[in-house]
């Protein structure tokens, strides 16, 4: 799945993709492009003030860290059985949580206070994430999307001593959806949100 996102729209005739690369493209690449496109459309029309933050989070998680983790840990068989809808849902849940965390700092005109949830609902509907009749995990994903609580990200990550990092329980069902370990979900989400929150805190102190 190396460079799978670059292979989606090849400019020149290339060698046939391996089965793993094809599965990566179809089950990770295309679903990722769809959710990214829907987010971009909403930002352009309704959420311009947070465009920079959205792009920072989305481009890092959706196009760098996420595919890298999936490619690293999933076997060929797991990748072949991976649901693109599940990939989208995990991305959306983490993305929505980032929005919830920054909502304390972001006040937009003519937008409801619960705008992170409205934003996420629009993306969910536009991607038809819970509409596929052959989706076997809808019953698992519905309560996850209905959750109104922010994800706990207070626990620092000790990369040198992994046993010292207490991985929150919220990571478990998300990890199960895409067949990775909970600590990988946490190690993708927490650092990004922490960096973003630091940026907002610096801005507030500078005022």
Image: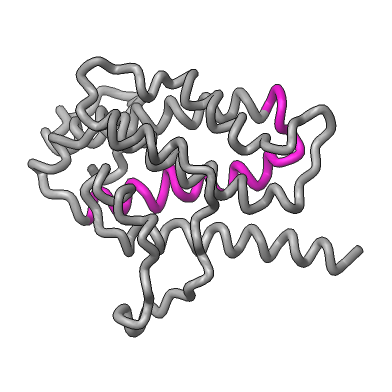
Give 89 or 192, whichever is nearer the viewer.
89
The residue depicted at 43 percent of the width and 25 percent of the height is 34
The residue depicted at 80 percent of the width and 37 percent of the height is 108
Does 29 sit left or right of 81 as displayed?
right
Residue 56 counted in the magenta span? yes
Q: Could you say where residue 129 lies in the image, as x and y percent from the top left?
A: 38, 24
The residue depicted at 87 percent of the width and 67 percent of the height is 206
Q: Quadrant of the C terminus?
A: bottom right
Does 15 sit left or right of 158 as displayed?
left
Q: Could you say where residue 197 lies in the image, as x and y percent from the top left?
A: 66, 61
Q: Based on the displayed image, in which of its 4 quarters is residue 9 positioned?
A: top left
The magenta stretch is 44-72
Q: Outermost residue toward the left?
A: 77
Instruction: Name the magenta segment's main secondary structure.
Output: helix
Q: Outermost residue toward the right?
A: 207
Give 154 or 24, whichever is nearer the viewer.
154
The residue depicted at 59 percent of the width and 29 percent of the height is 40
């Amino acid at each position: 799945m190396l460079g799978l996102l670059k292979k989606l729209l090849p400019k020149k005739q290339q060698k046939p993709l391996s089965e793993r690369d094809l599965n990566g493209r179809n089950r990770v690449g295309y679903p990722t492009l769809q959710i990214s496109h829907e987010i971009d459309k909403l930002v352009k029309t309704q959420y311009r003030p947070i465009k920079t933050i959205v792009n920072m989070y989305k481009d890092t998680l959706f196009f760098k860290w996420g595919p890298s983790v999936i490619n690293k840990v999933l076997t060929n068989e797991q990748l072949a059985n991976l649901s693109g809808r599940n990939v989208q849902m995990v991305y959306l849940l983490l993305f929505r949580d980032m929005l919830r965390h920054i909502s304390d700092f972001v006040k937009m005109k003519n937008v409801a206070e619960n705008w992170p949830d409205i934003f996420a609902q629009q993306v969910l509907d536009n991607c038809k994430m819970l509409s596929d009749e052959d989706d076997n995990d809808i019953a698992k994903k519905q309560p996850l999307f209905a959750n109104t609580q922010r994800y706990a990200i207070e626990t620092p990550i000790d990369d040198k001593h992994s046993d010292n990092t207490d991985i929150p329980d919220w990571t478990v069902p998300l990890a199960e959806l895409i067949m990775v370990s909970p600590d990988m979900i946490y190690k993708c989400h927490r650092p990004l949100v922490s960096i973003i929150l630091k940026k907002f805190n610096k801005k507030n102190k500078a005022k």
